[in-house]
Image: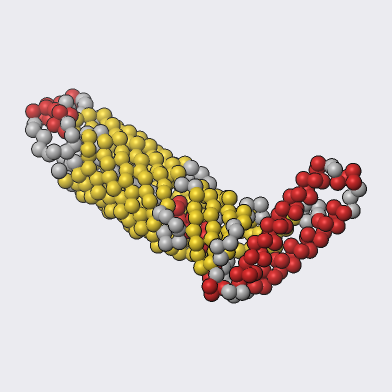
């Protein structure tokens, strides 16, 4: 199976944080007294940020108020999928949570984005995100059914890798505070990712606190910053879509898989019925036996329904379609971040960052140009 229904959902785990490490810094220390005194008397030449001149005259050194960065981003994240419902040719949808089991499923994404930003206030940066992404999703799953002894067995499996392209738009803001080269930034953004196989753009929210320190070089305005922090991603849980049947499964060999699956379902249903009929009336009233009987019948009915419906759709495969809905989430909400930025001068900066721990790994590289506005 290609199973693009699940793949398109897992694409939503393409989410990024493209925080630009510049900040308004409180100048402290006797060796910086000359710089601090000059800021108190120097006229601030730009319209942004609001209250920029007042803050500068109080001894704060401000970055240029506008910037544009180009970012390359790579991420791989494990995903969890549940509440999966599938139907064919706009008929009823069947909940497959009980009979579909996922092994390790993950999404890998590579993106190139542009990030324009401004300092609206001396301690608040706001920005936009515009980007293109390429993704590859790996899904491993199987359909499981029980027998009379409540032993579950796998009647078919599917493993797939598929590629998608997406367009992303987002908005973000970063409150910051800096004192003597030490700083704290709380980056957050919302993004919408447009994917052709989804009914509407996918929504994600990213939050990332960072704590860092900037070290100056002898050359004015040249420095290097290092930081540690976290990365938390939240994904809108519900996904719905509609696909051609040929995009959902590999039609070659599909009929044989369906026939074998139906035969196995019928065989296990017979075993369950024989077991139940062989119980005494007292044993049939036993809550444990009732629960086992109901669970087996429900799972076998669900497997039979989906396989029979798919069997009918295969007879008109070229004109058949698949409707689906599901919920998804990242396996881990948080991972750890370390990063560094080299500032050549107040105009040009180069940044690198990586995230790890948990079930998500990511790498970011960025070039930034800043100017007064």
Comparing 51 with 274, the one in front is 274
Compared with 323, 175 (above or below) is above
At 57% from the left and 50% from the top, the residue drawn is 82
Comparing 79 with 228, the one in front is 79
**Is 102 left or right of 239, judged from the image as shown?**
right
In x, y percent, where is residue 186? 35, 36
Residue farthest to the top? 30
Comparing 151 with 19, the one in front is 151
At 32% from the left and 46% from the top, the residue drawn is 171
**Is 358 left or right of 125, judged from the image as shown?**
right
**Is 366 left or right of 108, judged from the image as shown?**
left
Look at the image and tell me in which quarter the N terminus lies.
bottom right
**Is 322 left or right of 150, judged from the image as shown?**
left
At 58% from the left and 55% from the top, the residue drawn is 85
Look at the image and tell me in which quarter the C terminus lies.
top left
Any part of residue 307 in sight: yes
At 60% from the left and 63% from the top, the residue drawn is 158
In x, y percent, where is residue 322? 54, 64
Colour mapping: secondary structure
In x, y percent, where is residue 274? 86, 57
Quadrant housing residue 64: top left
Residue farthest to the front? 91
In x, y percent, where is residue 58? 16, 26
Compared with 24, 100 (above or below) is below
Any part of residue 110 in sight: no
């Amino acid at each position: 199976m290609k199973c693009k229904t699940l793949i398109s959902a897992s694409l939503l785990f393409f989410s990024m944080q493209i925080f630009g490490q510049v900040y308004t810094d409180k100048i402290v220390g006797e060796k910086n007294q000359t710089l601090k005194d000059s800021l108190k008397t120097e006229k601030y030449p730009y319209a942004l940020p609001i209250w920029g001149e007042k803050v500068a005259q109080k001894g704060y050194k401000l970055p240029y108020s506008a910037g544009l960065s180009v970012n390359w981003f790579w991420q791989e994240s494990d995903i969890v999928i549940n509440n999966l419902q599938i139907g064919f040719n706009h008929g009823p949808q069947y909940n497959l949570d009980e009979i579909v089991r996922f092994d390790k499923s993950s999404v890998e994404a590579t993106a190139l984005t542009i990030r324009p930003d401004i300092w609206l206030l001396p301690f608040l940066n706001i920005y936009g995100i515009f980007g293109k992404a390429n993704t590859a999703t790996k899904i491993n799953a199987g359909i499981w059914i029980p027998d009379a002894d409540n032993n579950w067995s796998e009647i078919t499996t599917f493993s797939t890798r598929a590629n998608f392209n997406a367009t992303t738009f987002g908005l973000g803001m970063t409150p910051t505070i800096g004192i003597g080269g030490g700083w704290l930034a709380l980056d957050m953004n919302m993004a919408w990712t447009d994917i052709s196989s989804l009914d509407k753009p996918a929504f994600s929210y990213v939050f990332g606190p960072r704590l860092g320190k900037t070290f100056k070089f002898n050359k004015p305005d040249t420095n290097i910053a290092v930081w540690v922090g976290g990365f938390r991603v939240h994904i809108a849980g519900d996904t719905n879509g509609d696909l051609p049947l040929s995009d959902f499964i590999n039609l070659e060999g599909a009929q044989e898989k369906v026939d074998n699956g139906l035969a196995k379902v019928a065989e296990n249903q017979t075993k369950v019925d024989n077991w139940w009929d062989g119980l005494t009336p007292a044993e049939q009233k036993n809550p444990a036996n009732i629960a086992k009987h109901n669970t087996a019948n429900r799972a076998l009915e669900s497997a039979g329904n989906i396989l029979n419906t798919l069997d009918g759709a295969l007879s008109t495969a070229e004109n058949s379609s698949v409707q689906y809905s599901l919920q998804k989430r990242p396996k881990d909400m948080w991972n750890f971040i370390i990063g560094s930025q080299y500032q050549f001068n107040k105009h040009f900066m180069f940044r690198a960052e990586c995230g790890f721990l948990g079930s998500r790994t990511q790498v970011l590289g960025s070039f930034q140009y800043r100017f007064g506005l």
